Amino acid sequence: MTPNDAAPQAHRQHLQSIIAGLNEGIILLEADGSIAWANASALDLHGAEKLEELGETPAGYRKRYTLTYRNHHRVPARQYPFDRLAAGEEFDNLLLDLARKDDEDFLRHVLARGLDLDDGGSLSYRVLILHDQTGQINAEQRFERAFSANPAPALICRLSDLRYVKVNQGFLEMTGYPRDDVLGKSAYELDVLDGGDDKETAVARLNEGRTIPQREAVLKLPDGSSKFVVVAGQPIDMQDEPCMLFTFIDLEGRKRTELALRESEERFSKAFRLAPVPMAVCDGDTLEVLDINDAFAAATGLSLEGSEARDLPALGLLPYEGMAASLKRGEIARNRDVVLTAQDGGQLDCLLSAEPVMIGGLRRVLLVMQDITERKRSETELLTAIEAVMQDTSWFSRGIIEKLAQLREPAPATRDVAELAQLTSREREVLGLLCQGHDDDGIAKALKLSRNTVRNHVATIYSKIGVHRRSAAIVWARDRGITGHESARARDKRPKS
């Protein structure tokens, strides 16, 4: 080696020592394109342990390795990086897929750059610089697959120009937009942050590349209609480009449900307010009265405002036994006798019905009261009149007695036979004679019984049917079709001794 050759060789060794430890793969080529040297990163990137495994020349390299572009097209032989460098051609940011012909599972993604370094004198270097993109591209591919397969609507906006660069099928199905009508559009043309008082804050976060918390927005659809959504933005990088990932939740179903619920509650409120019978709404757990209707206020003299957060007794309702515990358990009540006391001291006899209901998502109890004060007063007066008449029935005809007994509302044609089955045949005979107006002596004579026996039968009848007066027993019997004539006919048919 001559002194003139020693200097370039020293420079080359010095250069090799500098680049040996770099993370990038570095390969030095001779002027004819043959491979002169490679650092450890370049060997590892090719799955090689020794320099000779790279093929030594561009032709040898092509025999061992296959290069394809990212569009899966094969790189022509004369376009391989080594061939281009041998021809003195520089290139930059060439993204390639690197595969080994002897290992079908081997695949690397590399970013190649070629430099022709010539100092104009005796030094000339052709350098191939390789960046391993495998991890990044694999991650991007995984993200791409997950993004496309995710059923949740999503959209990616490039922050440099605020244009949409990716959209998944979920967003297209939710909005009805064709893919081409979304990709390339700006965030101003397809505004996903529209709606809400915090829009300016959300737009400012987008421009600054900051996270946009979940917020409600309104999307304009292709047919001119709108859709309510929840949108959130998360900053991400795609191929070293700062972007914003928008994800969406379709609120349309929930909005429709809320609207239907609101309309239903409005209808209930109107019906409640205008109902002609007293009504009240109570808390399902405490039974505190939350609201009363106009009819309740008119019946009791209470004001609507003054009825809030008070219990039922404070509103004048005298509950039936066990009412509070039953309603708190969510049980239904039907036509239970209660007394409602007005502000002036007057009392109303009512039939109360109660039903658990859900209002605004909360458990409530709806109370409905039917005022039966006049009906009860009429019944009492009728019973009193019949009692007075029964004190002396000797001068009344049988027809008049029957008409008096039938003054109450006639019973339906179908009766519960169980109510009559509790009476013995003798007790039914006694009850029938009572309906005909006979006193105890008359019944004893007709049935050939003693007066004390007749009294015992009458007491037993009272106990079984739940009455305390002769007139009430007659009304009870008439309601169930007993007139006494059937007993008389049965007696007449008995064989005479």
Image (cartoon, rainbow, N blue to C red):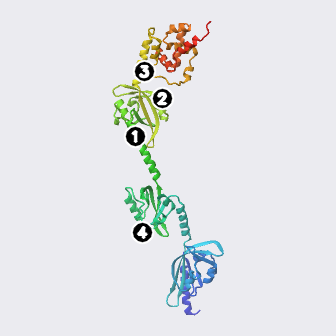
| 342 versus 73 height, above or below | above
| Residue with the mark numbered 4 | 161
Closer to the chain start, of discs 4 and 1, is: 4
For marks 1 and 3, the one nearer the N-term is 1
Of pointers 3 and 2, the one earlier in the residue sequence: 2
Crowding at dot 4, Cα within 10 Å, few <14 / some 14-19 / many 20+, comes out as few
The first of marks 1 and 2 along the sequence is 1
Which quarter of the rendering shows the N terminus? bottom right
Q: Residue at x 59, y 75 (%)?
A: 98
Which kind of residue does numbered mark 2 sit on? Gly
Task: Say which of marks 4 and 1 sits in front.
Answer: 1
Q: Residues within 10 Å of mark 1 (few under 14, many from 20)?
A: few
Q: Quadrant of residue 293?
A: top left
**Snapshot quadrant of residue 453:** top right
Residue position for label 2: 322
Q: Amino acid at mark 3?
A: Glu
Q: Secondary structure at mark 4?
A: loop
- Report the amino acid beneath label 4: Asp
Q: How far apart in space, not on screen, are marks 3 and 2 (Cα)?
A: 27 Å
Task: Judge depth for marks 1 and 2 and give the one in front.
Answer: 1
Judging by the rendered image, the residue that carries numbered circle 3 is 379
Task: Check if mark 3's residue and mark 2's residue have beta carbons within 8 Å.
Answer: no
